Amino acid sequence: MICHPDGIRRFILNWEEFPGPLVQMLHREAASGTNAGGPFARYAARLPGNASAMVTFFALLFGSLTAFAIGRMRIRHGWLVSNCALLTYVIPASFLAIPFYRIMQNYGLANNPWSVIAALVAFATPYAIFVFQEYGRSIPIEVDESARIDGASPLQIYLRIYLPLMAPALVAVGTYALLLAWNEYLYQFLLLSSKSSMTVPVALAQFLSSDQSPWNYMMATAIIYAVPPVAIYYAFRRRMTAGLTMGGVKGSRADPRRRSRSPPRLRPRSDLRDTPIGQR
Amino acid sequence: MSSTQQVLAAGPGVLNRRRRSSWHRHLHGSEFAWAIAFVVPYAAVFVAFVVYPIAYGLWMARDPSLYRDLIANPLYAQTVVNTVLYVGLGVNVKMFLALLLSGFFMRRRWWIKALLPVYILPWALPAIPAFVSFHWMLIGEEGLVDSVLSALFGIHGPLWFNDRRLALGSNIVAYIWKWMPFWTLTFLAGRMAIPQEIYESADVDGASGCRRFAHVIFPLLGNLYLVCTLLSTLWTVGDFTTVYLVSEGAPSYSTNVLATLGIHYAFEAAQPSLGVAAVMSARHPSWSSRSLGSWQVTGSRIPCGRLLRPT
């Protein structure tokens, strides 16, 4: 079926529902174990693919815009914004889950995938702002100034100069946000509890406590769910760590800025012998 | 060639001489409007999905009688003990093992290099499949661990989730297994930043093995170790998934931690205010350690960029 062009197109369009049949079997097995019987509801647990892509997109967009305004345009009191953003991490996300559940009902977003996207964007963006600001320090501000003299508007500078130069940091933070959103459980569990909007991790954990857990189907679903993040992780591991350490490590050997700025060491080896190790 | 291209062609070496920007002093008119427009999307998200939930949570937990109810409940006292045990044992054992293992992964043998990608697999795995399989390994008699025990040694393994200490221990072991690779990589980065000359001179002075670890490496990595322990403590206090999936609070809610107890109160016992009060009661230690932690991070120039990971 899948070899047919129409099947391929349908698969690409609905790839998130790929483990759907497996989840159906899960429910059937669990129900037969407990003699529940009766007509089966249509369970459509989907992979959180599109939601993760949305989280990545918005975290990168909002994070880079904010970091650009604070770090490059040097908006007044910008430090206040970035410090407030980091305050997000003062209270762990799991502690905010209960109020989140309530306010999503106030916003009318209950059982709507956008509620999870909004919550995860709120948790991923401060980190993005932090890394972008740190990484942006390695790009000389004179690049922006000369573009400004050429008559570029701030939007043009952001699109044509800032974003291309920030590419390594964007890749690093994008991978981070993608994995964060895909692996997230608590918010998907609380905010997407209806049968039509349920995601695979929520469906998986649902069967954990039943007496007759259909372990074979659960593990098969778990593998399908776990393969994409592991593949992405191993594919982007070097870039992830490279991008993040570029932003974070200062004064250490991993800092590429320092290496590029300092002139090549031409002193003879005998000079080094006299300096104490700690000062080198 | 425009001046932008000239500047880009000149490369970073020329440009870093003058770091003071003149832009911010002349930021007015349309540019100021642009800057505001750039910040507004995130500010809106921050107010709607960070400030409002925090304020709402504090408002929900405002009644002092909630805290009296909590303290009167023996379940809460037990949960606090569990949280302290889980965080204290989990974080410290994990950190110390990670510090030791980072030294092992510094070696340059080919099989050690090949082992590293396998070793970080638990961290790369999503939490749900990892902890679901942990739970499966430990369920009663048909679980993997007890099956192996009876097949190899002919002994009946314990019912892991029927005993509070065993269940708590399973949670802690699963937690350490999941997060140790991340911290090992962090310490590995820290060790890589130590100049090779220091090792060499320690070698010349005859310090090797344990003495090198105690007198050279630990003093150099001490600050990093402290900061990482503080950050990890903070994240672990908010850890929900491990306990919720591995032991599920069994037996009879006696292995809950504050995060799972809060969710239990809010969604199973239908007392959301009590749930918020339970988790908010943990905010004092986490606030103080956070301020200490961030002070340390800004003061010590460690790779904090990769450490800031919200759980």
Image (tube, coloured by chain):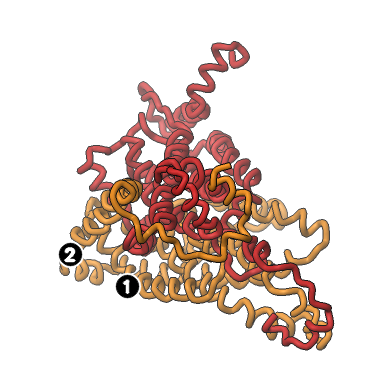
Relative to the observer, which residue lies in front, A159 or B160? Answer: A159
Residue at horizontal 62%, vertical 76%?
A: B221
Looking at the picture, which amino acid does disc 1 mark?
His
Secondary structure type for disc 2: loop
**In the rendered image of this protein, does residue B143 appear above or below residue B170?**
above
Is residue B170 shown to the viewer in this render? no
- Per the image, label 1 sits on a secondary structure element best described as helix
Q: Give the quarter of the figure containing the C terminus of chain B.
A: bottom left
Host chain of mark 1: B
Residue visible at 44% across and 55% down? A72
* Quarter-of-image position of residue A250: bottom right
Chain in orange? B
Q: Colour of chain A?
A: red
| Quarter of the figure with the N terminus of chain B | top right
Q: Nearer the viewer, residue B223 or A134?
A: A134
* Residues indicated by labels 1 and 2 sit on the same polypeptide chain: yes
Left or right: B81, with B223 as reference point: left
Q: Report how many numbered discs are placed on residues in the image.
A: 2
Q: Position of residue B153 (x, y in %)?
A: 71, 57
Residue wearing tag 1: B284
Residue B5 is tagged as none
Q: Residue at x 43, y 67 (%)?
A: B234
Is B164 situated above or below A8?
Answer: below
Subunit bearing disc 2:
B
The residue tagged 2 is B62
Q: CA distance from mark 1 to mark 2?
A: 15 Å
Mark sitting earlier along the chain (1/2):
2
Q: Residues within 10 Å of mark 1 (few under 14, many from 20)?
A: few
Whole-percent x, y for residue A263 in the image:
71, 68
Q: Position of residue B190 (x, y in %)?
A: 64, 69
Depth check, front residue: A73 or A248:
A73
The percent coordinates of residue B120 (x first, y second) are: 65, 54
